[in-house]
Image (spheres, rainbow, N blue to C red):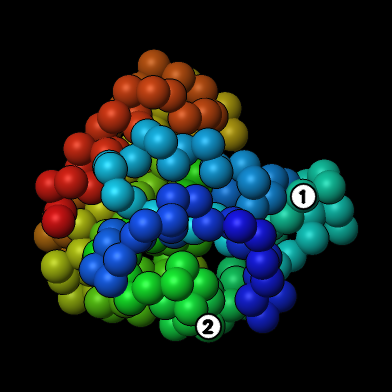
Amino acid sequence: MTSEHDLLRYEVEGAEGADDGSPVAVLLHGRGADRHDLRGLRDLLPQGTVLVTPEAPHPGGPWAYGPGWAWYRYVAEDRVVASTLLRSLERLDDFLADLPGIVGFDPGRVVLGGFSQGGTTSLAYALTRPGAVAGVAMLSGFLVDAPEEVPVRRDALDGVPVFWGHGFHDPAIPHVLGVRGRARLEGLGVALTARDYAMGHQIVPQEMNDLAEWMEGIG
């Protein structure tokens, strides 16, 4: 199902037959991709999970990201143009608030996550909206360095577990950035599940198996 919501277009997979209390995974695509990019992950998620894939609000063309879309403008390492990220977080506020209307039922557990920029944005959202989601799935992203806009507070992720998968050979977001971000979260006492893979900047089947197991465990 394709639709729009306050300028965020989206896809919904697996909502047929879902009922109140069904789990929902909201997965955000990476830089230069679109809402269709992660739709194929639906069958790799725990049975009964409804997948929602919104499209980022910033066109990628003006930033030389290709014909797709972006959640923020990247600077270097773990730095971004904060105003562009904040704009996306505000759009996600409205989007998640109306999630019952989007999926057609009252969701149970909601996991927010994504790949690359999508994972980075998801973690930033959870850090700035304590308790807004039940878990965060970080797939090859980073913890953004923006102390004023995205403060990393000890209480921000209380009761919100984080799955962080990363590739040892990632050329786009080097593994060292994953190590750095994970260390900061661990210093806060976050319930962090870290998994590394012999891969580049991608998603592999073993990572999805690990993610599905993690999602079932936070139920």
x, y (%) of residue 193?
Answer: 20, 43
Q: Quadrant of residue 88?
A: bottom right
Residue tagged 1: 68
Point 39% across, 16% down: residue: 198
Is residue 86 visible in the rendered image? The answer is: no
Name which residue type carries label 2: Asp
Q: Which mark is residue 140?
A: none
Q: Give the number of marks.
A: 2
Is residue 103 visible in the rendered image? The answer is: yes
x, y (%) of residue 140?
Answer: 45, 39
Q: Residue furthest front?
A: 17
Name which residue type carries label 1: Gly
Q: Earlier in the sequence, mark 1 or mark 2?
A: 1
Q: Nearer the viewer, residue 2 or 193?
A: 2
Would residue 103 appear left or right of 19 to someone viewing this image?
Answer: right
Q: Nearer the viewer, residue 215 or 177?
A: 215
Q: Residues within 10 Å of mark 1 (few under 14, many from 20)?
A: some
Q: Nearer the viewer, residue 211 or 102?
A: 102
Please, is residue 106 above or below residue 210 in the view? below
Point 64% across, 76% down: residue: 5
Q: CA distance from mark 1 to mark 2?
A: 22 Å
x, y (%) of residue 50?
Answer: 39, 55
Point 58% across, 49% down: residue: 29
Q: Which mark is residue 94?
A: 2
**Dot 2: element:** helix
x, y (%) of residue 54?
Answer: 58, 61
Check the picture and name the quadrant holding the C terminus: bottom left
Q: Residues within 10 Å of mark 2 (few under 14, many from 20)?
A: few
Point 74% across, 65% down: residue: 58
